[in-house]
Amino acid sequence: MSHNKTDAAVVWFRDDLRLSDHAALTAAAAGLRLVCLYVLDETVNRERLPGGASRWWLAGSLRALDESLKQLGQTLVLRKGDAAAIIPQIARQTNASRVFWIDSEVPWLMRQARDVSQALARDGIEAETVRSDLLARPQDLRTKEGRGPRVFTPFWKRLLGLGEPAQPLPAPRRLPPPADIASDRLEDWRLEPAQPDWAGGLRETWTPGEDSAQHRLRDFLDDDIKGYSNGRDRPDRDHTSRLSPHLRFGEISPRQVWHAAKFAAARQPALSRDVEKFLSELGWREFSRHLLFDLPDLHEKNLQASFDAFPWTRDMSALQAWRRGRTGYPIVDAGMRQVWHTGIMHNRVRMVVASFLVKHLLIDWREGERWFWDTLVDADPGSNPASWQWVAGSGADAAPYFRVFNPVLQGEKFDPDGAYVSRWVPEIARLPSSLIHRPWDATPMELAAAGITLGKTYPEPIVDHKAARERALAAYAKTR
């Protein structure tokens, strides 16, 4: 018996691993049969494949999505290879007449979608795409020069001027039954580390998936957002949303976060300043994605061309000390160890460790960007390079290069009791809080009482702050 071609559809999941506010899934749910498909396509942007921490997250996220689909009588089909070859082949095998997906404004994913659309068209199969997940399309925020704004504040004002983003869609209550089609085994993709298994700290810290994202958002808006506008700078406190990896993999959409936050502010007007600050952080993510839309090589090319002449230093031992959290500056080392263990780093500390690499060590920001790309669970193709360029002074709306964060003062200001440093640099935890950010100022007796031998149990500073600052300013003056 021949099937009518119109009775089956394919939903191609990409960086949108959820069921709610998924316009492509909602549209396809009206058909008679459905294939829910995820393609691991490593042909699309070889030099920018997800790093180790992101691959670990992706595995957990796909597992969670498959569980949610099973509750609706569906299943997630996994395939690895070139999406432009695999998707038409699956559509043909299942007699699907349409393939649905959510657009992406990430340049290489746009290129991939174009290839998939063309391949489907050759087979007479319709590509049904719906608007991307961003709060606004880059095309809607062009300047007179025909590109997106390069400074955050005007960008954010214009985005807010577009009015509220659309209301998020509920998850479908029912889905059509699956078409009979083979799937890869997730284990065979080897996304998770085996020998050695370095992901213990990630497992302790995170649960990937849509349910977890929704819980996290609720908990944050119920409790942790109170005092966010000041508390978000304190790594020793729990005032951040921790939604960034969930947003990176589309387990929750920016629209869902936006409307939930607005609702919280309407219910408790006292929170409105905290909510506004939180939404502007969502705005930075958006701003970075819009920059990436205009500048696909944001991760390797200075946005300010004047930086192309900057005299970076090649210093492998300093780079290694930074990566391992052995610089002798406690707040820097705490941040680098936090990311190594948990796949995340507090945002204030990210700025401090990035400034230290670029300005104290004069090491190219691209080295730091690559390390974060590999170690962060929220390594976002827009935010990661845009933030590194911002700190380096080569980016949009950049922190001026001559602003060199003092790691000691940053530690004393934002981790005044040393609680954050004590947690991640336990070998100096017994120092009094007045010395924990500057162990080299402790007397021999104070060091002995805390069980510290500088240079043995904890490193001496690998550079002197004052000398490093002067060297950085001299290098900057040359470039100008």
Image (tube, rainbow, N blue to C red):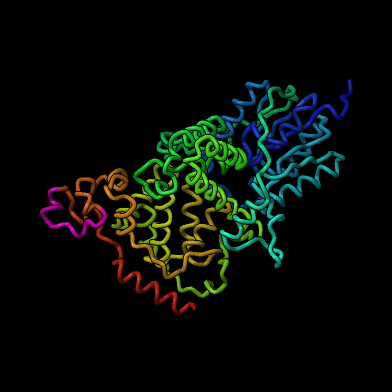
Describe residue 404's horizontal placement relative to residue 423 as left or right. Answer: right
Q: Where is residue 184 drawn, in percent x and y? A: 64, 32
In this rendering, does residue 52 appear at all? no
Which residue is at the far front? 269
Please report the bounds of the magenta region as a residue range. Answer: 437-449
Viewer-side residue, 94 vs 196: 94
Say if the magenta span includes residue 330: no
Q: Is residue 479 above or below residue 418?
A: below
Quadrant containing the N terminus in the rendered view: top right
Q: Position of residue 467 (x, y in %)?
A: 31, 71
Residue sitting at x 81%, y 35%: 98
321 relative to 94 in the view: left or right: left
Please give the name of the residue rendered at 51% of the width and 62% of the height, measured from the top-left corner.
389
One can see residue 400 in this view: yes
- Indicate whether 16 appears above or below 283: above
Residue 242: % across, % down: 47, 41
**Magenta segment: does it hold 440?**
yes
Vertical relation: 85 (above or below) 19: below
